């Protein structure tokens, strides 16, 4: 949900948010793409930091992407971001089909 909400906020008037999924024998790839305003490299480098937000004071806690990152990590997955100013953003989430014993989540 955090990725979808952020994508909607990145689109200033009208735009498109696309979700793609694919699988292989090892995992599931989920791709979220938007055609919003995009992020610079500095923002991309900090997007998963706790309490980091680009929103005005009082409008965001900066926890959504950090929480998403941690949940995905706990499931043995990965999340990456690709973005260009004026062209939009893409988040790629990969989750394993089977968790290892050390990565099992209660």
Image: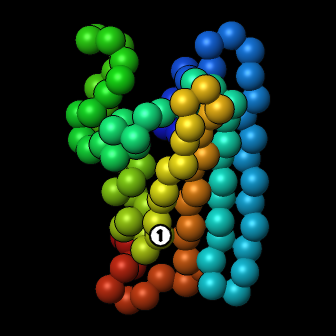
Q: Circle 1 — which element?
A: loop
Q: Position of residue 61 (x, y in %)?
A: 29, 26
5 vs 34, left or right, is left
| Image colouring | rainbow
Q: Say how many tags the image has.
A: 1
Residue 37 visible in the picture: yes
Q: Is residue 58 above or below residue 2?
A: above
Q: Position of residue 27 (x, y in %)?
A: 63, 77
Picture quarter containing residue 30? bottom right
Residue at 38% of width from left, 89% of height from top?
Answer: 101
Residue at numbered disc 1: 77
Q: Quadrant of the C terminus?
A: bottom left
Residue 1 visible in the picture: no
4 vs 71, left or right, is right
Q: Is residue 61 above or below residue 78?
A: above
Is disc 1 surrounded by few (<14), some (14 to 19) or many (20+) residues within 10 Å?
many
Q: Quadrant of the N terminus?
A: top right
Residue at 74% of width from left, 60% of height from top?
Answer: 21
Picture quarter containing residue 75? bottom left
Q: Position of residue 97 (x, y in %)?
A: 60, 79
Residue at 39% of width from left, 54% of height from top?
Answer: 69
Q: Is residue 26 above or below residue 22?
A: below
In this orientation, which residue lies closer to the viewer: 51 or 105? 51
84 vs 39, left or right, is right
75 vs 97, left or right, is left
Residue at 54% of width from left, 42% of height from top?
Answer: 83
């Amino acid at each position: 949900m955090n990725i979808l909400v952020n994508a909607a906020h990145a689109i200033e008037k009208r735009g498109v948010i696309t979700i793609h999924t694919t699988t292989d024998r090892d995992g599931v790839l989920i791709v979220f793409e938007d055609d919003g305003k995009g992020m610079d490299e500095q923002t991309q480098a900090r997007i998963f930091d706790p309490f980091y937000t680009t929103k005005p004071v009082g409008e965001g806690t900066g926890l959504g992407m950090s929480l998403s990152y941690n949940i995905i990590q706990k499931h043995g997955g990965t999340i990456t971001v690709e973005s260009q100013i004026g062209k939009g953003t893409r988040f790629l989430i990969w989750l394993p089909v089977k968790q290892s014993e050390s990565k099992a989540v209660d």
